[in-house]
Image (tube, coloured by chain):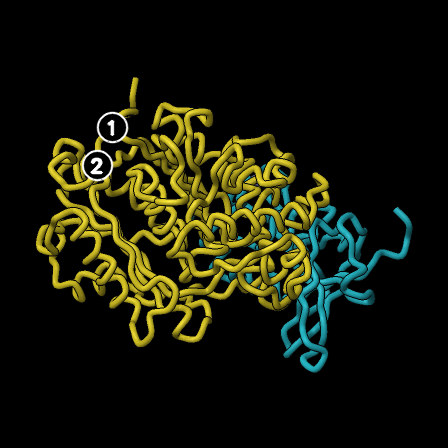
């Protein structure tokens, strides 16, 4: 138990996640016991309760699990996409699909992560995957 | 063997206040007026209340603010906050407190001036930091994502969702106290302004003011009051997530578990339920809850709710006051489904009265399909 608190005291999972993104790496915590990745990052595996976790870069590949177009007046920036992505490694996260009209995003679409900066805060969006899958 | 909370407490007073527009009133003013009406209904006074159960989007410590306003000094208080489902959940905690003698007269209450205060959803919720960068509209986008997934997996249509809004409106037209009573067609819903697709404006609940209060006592003294008592047969709670990204399967809510728990405690099945009141913040809620509570199979909610099946005259009376969609929805709606179920079991519902209603199911929702709470209520005949 002291070992884990020593480790987590160095930096919390949210800071670790963002520091990877700052270096343009999309990494998530993986459980050393059940081997599952989880998102959002925690100090404990939500699937099995293990506190011993390691951070690994992930593929950035995923699939649209669900999607909505939020309608907004053109003068305020127009319609935009909000979706849920199931990553190939398992976890699900909220994101948006770029490089495609919001209304053309479909459930089941294969997508690839892109790390962008907005107000100096790095975060992950997705674009349609090039290769057929 | 029956659960020892089954039928151990009963509702002997209900009150509504300020439903629709309550100009110039604060949330606690409305709550207090609803409480006044519930006390009148039960033939009790404020000083009789020694158990307080409440939740609020306006008061960080709602039991303290409420008791202070009312001038009461409860022996037992519970401000458990699970969003709009809180007031349904409070029935379980009140039953436990009454059964164990921690209080003798429990008040469950709520009030909100959401509409006249400007229509914005009051919230003390923390920002969800892993969702905020994508600017989802809270809470509608979470429900839209669930609706889109249900459509994808089961072929559910916008027309079927629209029929839920139409059924709610038809019930509202039988309820003089409902806020929205104009005629409504499937086309009206489909043609209303899209907000977060597939959900458009008329897939969304109203924004009104309103308050409600419920008074519960031990069943041993339930017949000492002017109205026919309504017994709490069972309540079950369940929650699997807080944020929509963490919901394991967007087509299955924790209502599956809360319902199983409530049915088990109550010792009844779906076939015994005469009237159903579910928290319809959006049309998709009604569909998901009817499936998860076992009134139809998973994926068959679309056909089940269409063609008037849950409307007046249909096979299953659902949301007989007109629901959050057409009757009342002041920020959090849980207390109002409870009150409508009680009124149905008392036989006080006039034109919308369900014949021989003896067992009612109430289902509350909180957060973004997050907290699920099911209560089953019954008359003396089913005790
Ligand atoms: Zn694990």
User: In the rendered image of this protein, does residue A48 appear above or below residue B198?
Assistant: above
The residue nearer to you, when weighing A10 against B56, is: B56
For chain B, give the colour.
yellow
Residue nearer the viewer, B207 or B103: B207
Looking at the image, which residue sits at the far bottom?
A75
Residue A133 as seen in the image, left or right of residue B193: right
**Residue pictured at 30% horizontal, 67% vertical:** B27
**Residue beneath disc 2:** B228
Q: Is residue A43 visible?
A: no
Asked if ligand 1 lies within 8 A of label 1, the reply is no
Packing grade of label 2 (10 A; few <14, some 14-19, many >=20) is some
View quadrant of ligand 1: top right
Locate residue B221: give its quadrant.
top left
Tell me the distance, in whole angstroms, between the alpha carbons under discs 2 and 1.
8 Å
Residue in the image at 40% along x and 31% along y: B261
Q: Name the residue under label 1.
A: B380
Residue A57 seen from this side: yes
Q: Are the residues tagged 2 and 1 within 8 Å (C-beta)?
A: yes
């Amino acid at each position: 138990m002291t070992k884990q608190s020593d480790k987590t005291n160095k930096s919390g999972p949210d800071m670790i996640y963002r520091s990877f993104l700052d270096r343009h790496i999309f990494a998530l915590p993986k459980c050393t016991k059940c081997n599952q990745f989880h998102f959002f990052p925690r100090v404990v595996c939500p699937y099995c309760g293990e506190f011993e976790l390691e951070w690994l870069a992930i593929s950035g590949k995923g699939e649209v699990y669900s999607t909505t177009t939020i309608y907004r007046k053109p003068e305020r920036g127009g319609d935009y996409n909000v979706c849920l992505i199931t990553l190939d490694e398992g976890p699900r996260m909220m994101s948006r699909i770029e490089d495609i009209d919001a209304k053309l995003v479909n459930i089941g679409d294969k997508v690839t992560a892109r790390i962008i900066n907005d107000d100096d805060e790095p975060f992950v969006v997705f674009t349609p995957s090039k290769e057929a899958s | 063997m029956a659960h020892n909370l089954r039928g151990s407490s009963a509702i002997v007073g209900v009150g509504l206040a300020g439903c629709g527009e309550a100009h110039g009133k604060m949330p606690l003013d409305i709550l207090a007026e609803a409480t006044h009406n519930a006390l009148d209904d039960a033939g009790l006074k404020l000083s009789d209340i020694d158990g307080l159960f409440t939740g609020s989007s306006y008061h960080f410590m709602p039991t303290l603010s409420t008791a202070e306003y009312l001038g009461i000094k409860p022996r037992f208080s519970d401000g458990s906050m699970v969003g709009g489902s809180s007031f349904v959940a409070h029935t379980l905690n009140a039953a436990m407190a009454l059964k164990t003698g921690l209080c003798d007269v429990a008040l469950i209450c709520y009030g909100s001036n959401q509409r006249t205060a400007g229509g914005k959803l009051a919230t003390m919720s923390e920002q969800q930091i892993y969702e905020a960068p994508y600017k989802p509209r809270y809470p509608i986008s979470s429900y839209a994502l669930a609706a889109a997934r249900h459509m994808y997996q089961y072929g559910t249509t916008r027309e079927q969702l629209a029929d839920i809004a139409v059924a709610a409106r038809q019930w509202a037209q039988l309820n003089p106290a409902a806020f929205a009573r104009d005629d409504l067609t499937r086309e009206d819903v489909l043609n209303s302004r899209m907000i977060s697709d597939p959900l458009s404006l008329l897939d969304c609940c109203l924004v009104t003011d309103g308050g409600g209060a419920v008074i519960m006592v031990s069943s041993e003294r339930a017949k000492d009051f002017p109205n026919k008592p309504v017994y709490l047969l069972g309540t079950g709670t369940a929650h699997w997530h807080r944020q929509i990204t963490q919901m394991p399967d967007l087509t299955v809510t924790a209502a599956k578990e809360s319902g199983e728990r409530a049915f088990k405690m109550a010792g009844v099945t779906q076939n015994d339920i005469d009237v159903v009141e579910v928290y319809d913040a959006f049309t998709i809620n009604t569909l998901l809850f009817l499936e998860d509570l076992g009134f139809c199979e998973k994926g068959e909610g679309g056909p089940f709710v269409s063609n008037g099946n849950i409307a007046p005259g249909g096979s299953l009376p659902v949301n007989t006051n007109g629901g959050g969609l057409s009757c009342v929805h002041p920020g959090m709606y849980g207390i109002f489904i409870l009150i409508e179920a009680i009124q149905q079991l008392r036989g006080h519902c006039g034109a919308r009265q369900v014949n021989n209603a003896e067992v009612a199911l109430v289902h509350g929702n909180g957060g973004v399909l997050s907290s699920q709470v099911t209560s089953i209520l019954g008359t003396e005949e089913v005790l």
